[in-house]
Amino acid sequence: MATEFAKIIHAMVVESAVPVKELALRVGKPYSTLLREANPYDERAKLGVETFVQLVKATGDISPMEHIARELDLELVPKKRPAAK
């Protein structure tokens, strides 16, 4: 059974503005491996935390981080705030 977090990871990978093949190159994974590791229904393949961090950086999608923060009752606050106008 796919968890909500696994579905968020999958969406981050396949719905990114960066094509999956490019993401695979950026994180140093074969295309098929990345797709398998991001597949929420493949219980045998797992996405490592190092790859997860690289994917967040490559896509700019922090929705998985936001999910983790909600689950742990934490706030996710950006380090740098936009300059006031």
Image (spheres, rainbow, N blue to C red):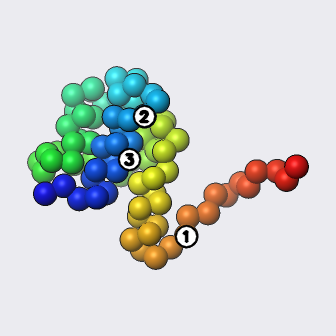
Q: Is residue 83 left or right of residue 37?
A: right
- The disc, 2 or 3, on the residue closer to the chain's N-terminal end is 2
75 shown above or below 1? below
Query: Element under label 1?
Result: loop
Quarter the N terminus occupies? bottom left
Q: Which mark is residue 9?
A: none
Residue 7 appearing in the image: yes
Kindly identify the residue that appears in the image at 64 percent across and 58 percent down.
78
- The disc, 2 or 1, on the residue closer to the chain's N-terminal end is 2
- Report the residue marked by disc 2: 16
> Which of the two discs, 2 and 3, sits closer to the camera?
2
The span from disc 1 to disc 3 (Cα, nearest Å) is 19 Å
- Report the residue marked by disc 3: 52
Q: Position of residue 29 (x, y in %)?
A: 30, 30
Query: Element under label 2?
Result: loop
Q: Is residue 43 left or right of residue 57?
A: left
Q: Amino acid at mark 2?
A: Ser
- Report the residue marked by disc 1: 75
Q: Amino acid at mark 3?
A: Phe
